Every structure is written in C-alpha cells, then in structure tokens.
Image (cartoon, helix red, strand yellow):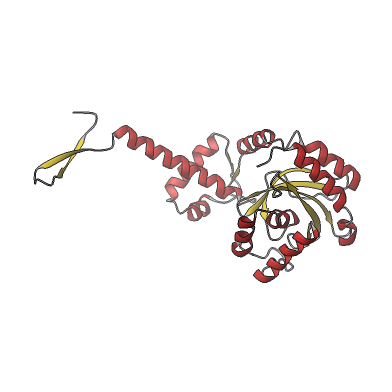
Amino acid sequence: MSVNQTTEVPAASGHPAEVPSKPAKAAREDSRTDMVGKALGLLVLLGDEPRGASAAEISRRADLPFSTTYRLLGSLTRDGFVDYEPDGRRYHLGLRVFQLGQRVSNHHGFAGTALPILRRVTEETGEATILSVRDGIHHLTVNKVDGPQTFRVTSDPGHLGALHTTSVGKALVAFADDATRAQLVEELPLEPLTALSITDREAFRAEIEQVRRQGFATMDEENELGMRAVAVPVFNAQGHAFASLATAVPVFRLSMEALAALVPLLQAAAAELSARLPQR
C-alpha cells in the first residue's frame, strides 16, 4: 500500500479522478497541534481562577469533554504546569508557569531594569509600588515592591485584574492608542467587584476622559474594599501607555488627597521607566 493514499472523486468526464488525501502523518500532527492548543487554553482558564477549579468546572468552561480535560490536566500536572490540590480536588497554575513568566519578565526588562526604580519609589512613600501592563481586557501585574508596613497589597506579579476597577487599568485604557481606547471604553465588561465599582458605560467614559485630563488615575475601594491607589501611565515613543505605575495603600493610612500628592513622584519614576524599559 502506498504511503500517500488517494481518494477517487468523479471527474467532469464521468471517469474517476485521483485526488491525494492528507497523509496519515500530517493528520496526526494536526491532532497533536490541536491538543496543544486545548492544553494552553486550560492554562489560560486556570489563570483566571486564583482559588483554583475542579476538573468538572474547567471542562465546562473550556467546552471540552470531561475525559479530554482530565487527561490534559494530568499531563500538565506531571510536567509542573499545573498543581493538584487533593483535599479540595482543585487545580491551580503550577510553578513551571511562574518560572516561564519570570523569564518573560526578565526578557522585557521588567524585573532587572524596573525593580530598582520601584524600590526607590517605595522607599520614598513607604507603600507598595506596582507595575502593570495590559493583557487583553485585563491588567497584568509584572512587578511589585511591598512597603515596610505589615498591611500587604495582594496584587502579586502574575495577577490578572480588571481594567475598569483599578487605577493601573484605568491609566492603561485612558492612554492607549485612540482605536484601542475607543474599543475598550465601549466594549469592556463593567462587572462590579465592590459596591463602588463603575458599572455604567457613560460613567466609565467620563472617568476615562477625566483620567486623560488630569494625567493620572485613581481607585477608591472600587476593586477591593479597604484599598485605594493612584497610577500614572508609562509612555512609549508614540505617546501611548505600554505600562502603568501605581502606589496602593489601605484606606486607613492615606487619604485620597495625600495619595494624589504622590503623582509627581510616580510620574518621574514612569519617565525613567519609559527611557529604560523595552517598549511594546
């Protein structure tokens, strides 16, 4: 039997014509590629579940058969990309994903180059300093330096957060290029995270315009009760934000006015980051 099998189809003359079918090897490669894509999709879904998820929940969200999901999770767990919690029967992103993320961060200069600047800001403010970039409809924390205080900010590197409820997210939206900003303002899901979250489209549009006018963004318990923050854009050569820099504090420690007074310090640090970081 020939390796490249053929399939007969009727020709215009009425006689069968031979058309090469896809080789079995190519079909197997397509199948493997498809499974790789499904496995990566499961990692993305787990990234949106900070408390983890069961195989059944992941299967339902991924719209995959349970058997396929369970098999892929087993492979990902074996290779360290996923951790399994036996007590709760839940899956979490594994250490291997964190290691790869750190390498990406280093590659883009966010770890080695940005860290000294963030540390200097924290030394002056005594509060947490956070550097974020936009990842689709979320912001991604790429670096953070905690302050010396015992009360700790929970947005660790690798954290995906909402754009409309955070100061870093609002800054990224407000100072994106015109087309991206318009799309995000009109289409971003405005789901509430606290009773103070902006959920009205017109109110969000007005908020973004205010951020553009004043040059910085704020968050006052909109993302997490008991926390407030102020953020400024980090501009690329085209004048668009490729990152944002924030100071975050518990509400009992600084008023919004005192927090806004830190904007010049953040803007100076953002200008330094803009000059030093590889721009996206």
Q: Nearer the viewer, residue 210 or 70?
A: 210
Q: Residue at x 70, y 53 (%)?
A: 172
Q: Tell me where residue 36 appears, x and y as whole percent.
A: 46, 40
Quarter-of-image position of residue 182 = bottom right
Relative horizontal placement of residue 48, taking residue 5 as reference (left or right) = right
Q: Residue at x 90, y 58 (%)?
A: 258
Question: Compared with residue 237, is residue 208 higher up or lower down, i.e. above or below?
Answer: below
Q: Residue at x 51, y 46 (%)?
A: 41
Q: Tell me where residue 117 appears, x and y as whole percent.
A: 82, 39
User: Is the N terminus in the top left, top right, bottom left or bottom right quadrant?
Assistant: top left
In this rendering, does residue 222 appear at all? Answer: yes
Question: Compared with residue 122, is residue 100 higher up or lower down, i.e. above or below?
Answer: above
Question: Compared with residue 185, is residue 107 higher up or lower down, i.e. above or below?
Answer: above
Furthest-front residue in this view: 238
Q: Nearer the viewer, residue 224 or 188?
A: 188
Count of marks, rendered view: 0
Question: Compared with residue 75, is residue 244 higher up or lower down, i.e. above or below?
Answer: below
Q: Residue at x 54, y 34 (%)?
A: 79
Q: Tell me where residue 190 appears, x and y as whole percent.
A: 64, 64
Q: Tell me where residue 104 appears, x and y as whole percent.
A: 64, 36
Furthest-top residue in this view: 2
In this rendering, does residue 90 appear at all? Answer: no
Relative horizontal placement of residue 18, taking residue 86 as reference (left or right) = left
Q: Nearer the viewer, residue 253 or 121?
A: 121
Furthest-left residue in this view: 14
Relative horizontal placement of residue 76, taking residue 8 as reference (left or right) = right
Q: Nearer the viewer, residue 20 or 71?
A: 20
User: Is the C terminus in the top left, top right, bottom left or bottom right quadrant?
Assistant: top right
